[in-house]
Amino acid sequence: MGHVYVGAYFYNPIDYTKYILGRRRLEDVRRISLRSLVDTGATYPALPEDIVEKLGLPIHGETEAETATGRERVKLALAIIQIEDRFVASYGIVRPREADVNEVLQTYKEIREIARKILEKK
């Protein structure tokens, strides 16, 4: 079983709205291009906190969410997301900084490996 990645742009929604209204040039819209993991079971995309801060994404509160580390309270940031020629406004889960994310991903991989071994024994 492999992973599927796509190229995605994440835009600041306020800057992007001003661009759509003709009040800002596209090159002045805060955005970032990321290689993004496709997780069909996710309700929201997840973005590292440093990316959220860099883009100036507005925080729209908190919610309970099931994450790779278990059930926890998470912040939600609003972004405009572009994949190929499709655009959507979506909340995203604000995750710990990139260094912390790598540690979480390693733990998640270890848990998946343990689960795989258990399932193979059945």
Image: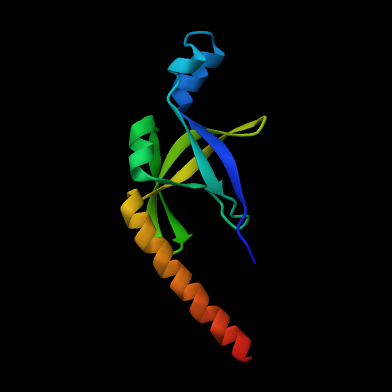
Q: Tell me if residue 17 comes above or below residue 115 in the rendering.
A: above
The colour style of the image is rainbow
Q: Quadrant of the C terminus?
A: bottom right
> Image point 38% across, 38% down: which residue?
52
Q: Which quadrant of the figure has residue 89?
A: top right
Q: Which residue occupies the extreme bottom position in the image?
A: 121
Q: Tell me if residue 115 comes above or below residue 34 in the rendering.
A: below
Q: Position of residue 28 (x, y in %)?
A: 43, 16
> Image point 56% across, 15% down: which residue?
20
- Left or right for 95, reference 81: left
Asked whether the viewer can see residue 71, the reply is no
Count of number-bearing discs: 0
Residue closer to the observer: 72 or 57: 57
Q: Which residue occupies the extreme top position in the image?
A: 22
> Image point 45% across, 22% down: which residue?
14
Q: Position of residue 112 (x, y in %)?
A: 51, 73
Q: Quadrant of the N terminus?
A: bottom right
> Image point 33% across, 36% down: which residue?
53
Q: Which residue occupies the extreme right position in the image?
A: 85
